[in-house]
Amino acid sequence: GENVEQHPSTLSVQEGDSAVIKCTYSDSASNYFPWYKQELGKRPQLIIDIRSNVGEKKDQRIAVTLNKTAKHFSLHITETQPEDSAVYFCAARDLLTGRRALTFGSGTRLQVQP
Amino acid sequence: DAEITQSPRHKITETGRQVTLACHQTWNHNNMFWYRQDLGHGLRLIHYSYGVQDTNKGEVSDGYSVSRSNTEDLPLTLESAASSQTSVYFCASRPKLTGEAFFGQGTRLTVV
């Protein structure tokens, strides 16, 4: 089955700096890679996703890049703000065949210091 | 508005008891999932369902069961609760063809 590794487990940055979280996946059939943000005591919520037919996707201060050859994808947050502090999860799955459930990474706790 | 809701939000139970966690969604989504969240492990899949009368085991299914008698509900049952099942449980649902999964608010279960 799919295995998703996520690094780092914790990340502390100063407000205004950039943050990068990296994930690797094992199943070359995976073609959908979402990122979820979970604030303390809340449910995970989708913030951005990318499909394997594109290499990069951007939404305001958030961007995701995908390298299919190396089987890794990354979340980039620019100009971080205190409200970006949360746990971020990457995930992967095959949209077309096989398992239809997301496999998640172990999460990254991001702290943005004011 | 359509939603996905879990109940109860918090539960304390004793070892050996049977416990059922409820999950109800009003989006008419075919696919529903149960995950557990533990520090250092992220979200791990327990069981999932593609539709009515369909259930499948995930990576950590031992000690858990689900049933799908209608589209809206996927209750999760712990047959005989163990301390190792102390966790936060999330239910999620997704339309048949799209990628995004929507999560419930979570249930914090403590087994003493």
Image (tube, rainbow, N blue to C red):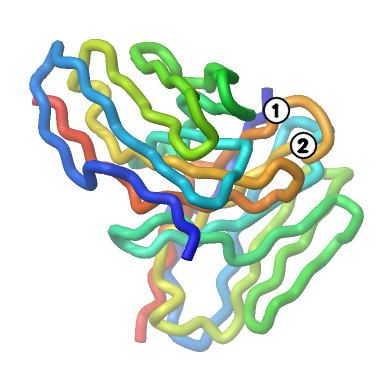
Tell which residue pokes out farthest to the front in this image.
B70
Front one among B27 and A16 = B27
Front one among B96 and B37 = B96
Measuring 70% from the left and 59% from the top, which residue is drawn there? A49
User: Mark 2 belongs to which amino acid?
Assistant: Asp
Near mark 2 (Cα within 10 A), the count class, few <14, some 14-19 or many ≥20, is: many
Secondary structure found at label 2? loop
Front one among A31 and A17 = A31
Figure label count:
2
Measuring 71% from the left and 39% from the top, which residue is drawn there? A93
Q: Which chain carries label 1?
A: A
Q: Point out residue B66 in the picture as x, y percentages from the top left corner.
A: 43, 21
Q: Earlier in the sequence, mark 1 or mark 2?
A: 2
Drawn side of residue B106 relative to residue A15, left or right = left
Q: Point out residue A78 in the picture as x, y percentages from the top left corner.
A: 61, 81
- Residues tagged 1 and 2 counted as in contact (Cβ below 8 A): yes
Query: Badge 2 is on which residue?
Result: A94
Query: Badge 1 is on which residue?
Result: A99
Q: Quadrant of residue A19?
A: bottom right
Q: Can residue B23 be seen in this view?
A: yes
Measuring 72% from the left and 53% from the top, which residue is drawn there? A73
